[in-house]
Image (spheres, rainbow, N blue to C red):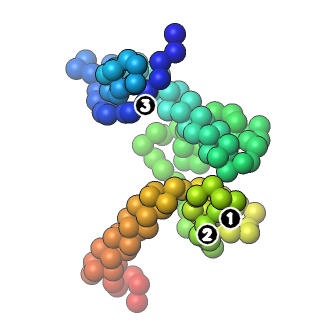
Amino acid sequence: MAIRISEVKSSRLSDDKKEVIVGGSGKYIGDVELKIARECVDAFIDALVSARGTLEAAVVGAVPSADTAAVPKRNARSGDNPDEVRFEIPKTFAVTADTEGRGLVLLILNHRLENQEGYALSPDAARQVAGGLTKSADILQASPVAGEQNK
């Protein structure tokens, strides 16, 4: 039986620390809790990330390749450690409004380079990213350590 979750409200660890509990609600089911066993959490996240990639490709109008349709390896660039994220500094980037009328803001890292990657954001998400970038940059510029590095 399929259920439709229309809102995710919370997440927490179970008292015995063996499950992640995600609270949400749906139109016809009311409040619901999903309990994901500890050993399934990474696979659950990978399945959601894969589904999100498929949805984003559908919104942008691209056809997912065999590589993007497969479940991505979690933090593949940083090994199997789920707590580790590898950061790269892009050589170039571009930000533009989608000209196809889908109402998206396009962010392209390493624009026109071999390792180009793109993201499509809603206008609200783009504003949130822009605000976060500006706030973080302001904090760093006000920091004495960062000020010395930027001279």
Seen in the picture, residue 50 relative to 1 is either above or below; the reply is below
Seen in the picture, residue 63 relative to 148 is either above or below; the reply is above
Seen in the picture, residue 73 relative to 62 is either above or below; the reply is above
Crowding at dot 3, Cα within 10 Å, few <14 / some 14-19 / many 20+, comes out as few
Secondary element under disc 2, as helix, strand or loop, is strand
Q: Which residue is rendered at x = 57% and y = 39% of the image?
A: 52
Q: Which residue is rendered at x = 38% and y = 65% of the image?
A: 132
How many numbered marks are there?
Answer: 3
Q: Amino acid at mark 1?
A: Thr
Asked which quadrant contains residue 32, the reply is top left
Secondary element under disc 1, as helix, strand or loop, is loop
Viewer-closest of 83 and 31: 31
Q: Are marks 1 and 2 in contact (CB under 8 Å)?
A: yes
Viewer-closest of 99 and 120: 99
Q: Are marks 3 and 2 in contact (CB under 8 Å)?
A: no
Seen in the picture, residue 142 relative to 103 is either above or below; the reply is below
Q: Amino acid at mark 3?
A: Ser
Viewer-closest of 85 and 1: 1
Q: Position of residue 57 (x, y in %)?
A: 67, 45
Disc 3 designates what residue? 6
Q: From this viewpoint, which residue is outermost toward the top?
A: 1
Q: Position of residue 46 (x, y in %)?
A: 55, 33
Label placed on residue 99: 1
Viewer-closest of 11 and 148: 11
Quarter of the image that includes the C terminus = bottom left
Label placed on residue 96: 2
Q: Are marks 1 and 3 in contact (CB under 8 Å)?
A: no
Q: Which residue is rendered at x = 66% and y = 67% of the image?
A: 110
